[in-house]
Amino acid sequence: MEQGLEAQKGGEDIRRVIKLVKSINGVDYLVFFRNNGFATHSNLTDSWLTDKVAATASLLREVGNMMTAEVGKGEAETITLYTGDGSGVIVYTGPGQTVNTAIVFGKRTKLGVLLYTLKHLNQE
């Protein structure tokens, strides 16, 4: 994902990632954001909500990285928040990445498939 997202050739790579990740049953929304908290792409139709998700996810990324660094585990790759019904948000990040992803998922989402897909997008 890092190589494709870093290139940002007309957003084509991002559209490909959105299509692939959205094909996973239960994935509702994706927001791509920079380390500064600004959204770059999203499949949300509300720009205010897109900006809010990007800013909040960026903050979670920083908190997650500080917490894992404090206990000597390096930078976080995923930060996951769950609601009471099992749905939630995954903030997918990685060392050296400048574009990160926030994914809103439903309670029936196969998280293993989602995380596997995200990790292997990074290798393409």
Image (tube, rainbow, N blue to C red):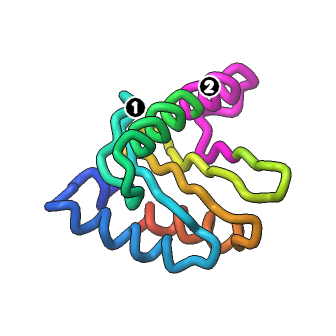
Looking at the picture, which amino acid does disc 1 mark?
Gly
Relative height, residue 55 to residue 121 (above, below):
above
Q: Please tell me whether mark 1 sits on a helix, a strand or a loop.
A: loop
Q: Please tell me whether mark 2 sits on a helix, a strand or a loop.
A: helix
Magenta stretch: includes residue 65: yes
Question: Residue furthest toward the left?
Answer: 10
Position in image of residue 95 (x %, y %): 48, 40
Position in image of residue 72 (x %, y %): 71, 26
Q: Nearer the viewer, residue 75 or 64?
A: 64
Task: Name which quarter of the figure residue 13 lies in.
Answer: bottom left
Position in image of residue 63 (x %, y %): 62, 25
Residue at image point 65% right, 25% down: 69
Position in image of residue 6 (x %, y %): 27, 51
Looking at the picture, which amino acid does disc 2 mark?
Val
Q: Residues within 10 Å of mark 1 (few under 14, many from 20)?
A: many
Instruction: Tell me the tag on residue 63.
Output: 2
Residue at image point 44% right, 61% down: 122
Visible in this render: residue 28?
A: yes
Q: Nearer the viewer, residue 74 or 39?
A: 39
Instruction: Tell me the tag on residue 62.
Output: none
Relative height, residue 120 to residue 80 (above, below):
below
Q: Residues within 10 Å of mark 2 (few under 14, many from 20)?
A: some
* Residue labelled with disc 1: 37
Q: Quadrant of the N terminus?
A: bottom left
Count the labels in the image. 2
Visible in this render: residue 1?
A: no
Q: Nearer the viewer, residue 80 or 52?
A: 52
